Image: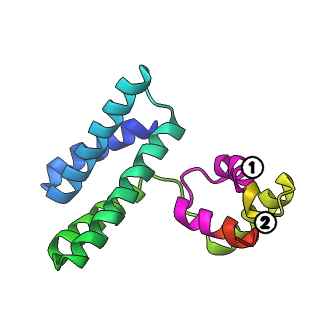
Amino acid sequence: MELQQRIETALKEAMREKSEVKRDALRMLLTALKLKEKEIKRAPSEAETQQVIATLIKQRRDSAGQYRTGGREDLATKEESEILILQGFLPEQLSAGELEKIVADSVAEAGASSPKEMGKVMKILMPKIAGRADGKTVNDLVRRKLGG
């Protein structure tokens, strides 16, 4: 089943279950997908849909951190619940070992040896891991590999 259809089906189930957090998270996701569709003037591909989901997860992580800093544990917990719901629509995340191996292979493939060549490595690496690893984690790993 196509990813967007899975999301719509999950929304209907959440409404039947009267799960407000799940319902709200899925509505927010579908709205973001509709905005993406208007932006690119066609239905988003699976990869583009996964990218939208990853962006929303990143936003939720940032918000949860800010809520914690502000002493709003209740709102931080809600954001983290939404993260778990959204992650259910992404492919299985790579383990640390798998990710390190893919990063090492990409650095070798790019022939990169200094932090200045990070862009070349990322260009090769990102399509391999799309939606299966956090961008910040990947960025940090590549920096360490290149001695930055």
Q: Is residue 138 left or right of residue 9?
A: right
Q: Residue beneath label 2, please? A: 104
Q: Which residues, given as a range, are shown in magenta?
A: 118-140
Of 117 and 19, nearer the camera is 117
Q: Which mark is residue 63?
A: none
Q: CA distance from mark 1 to mark 2?
A: 13 Å
Is 129 part of what is drawn in magenta? yes
Q: Is residue 148 left or right of residue 54?
A: right
Query: Residue 47, percent across and down?
Result: 54, 40
Q: Which mark is residue 120?
A: 1
Q: Residues within 10 Å of mark 2 (few under 14, many from 20)?
A: some
Going from N to C along the chain, the mark reached first, 1 or 2, is: 2
Kind of residue indicated by mark 1: Lys
Q: Residue at image x 18%, y 78%?
A: 73
Give the vertical position of 20 relative to 33 (above or below).
Answer: below
Q: Residue at image x 70%, y 73%?
A: 144
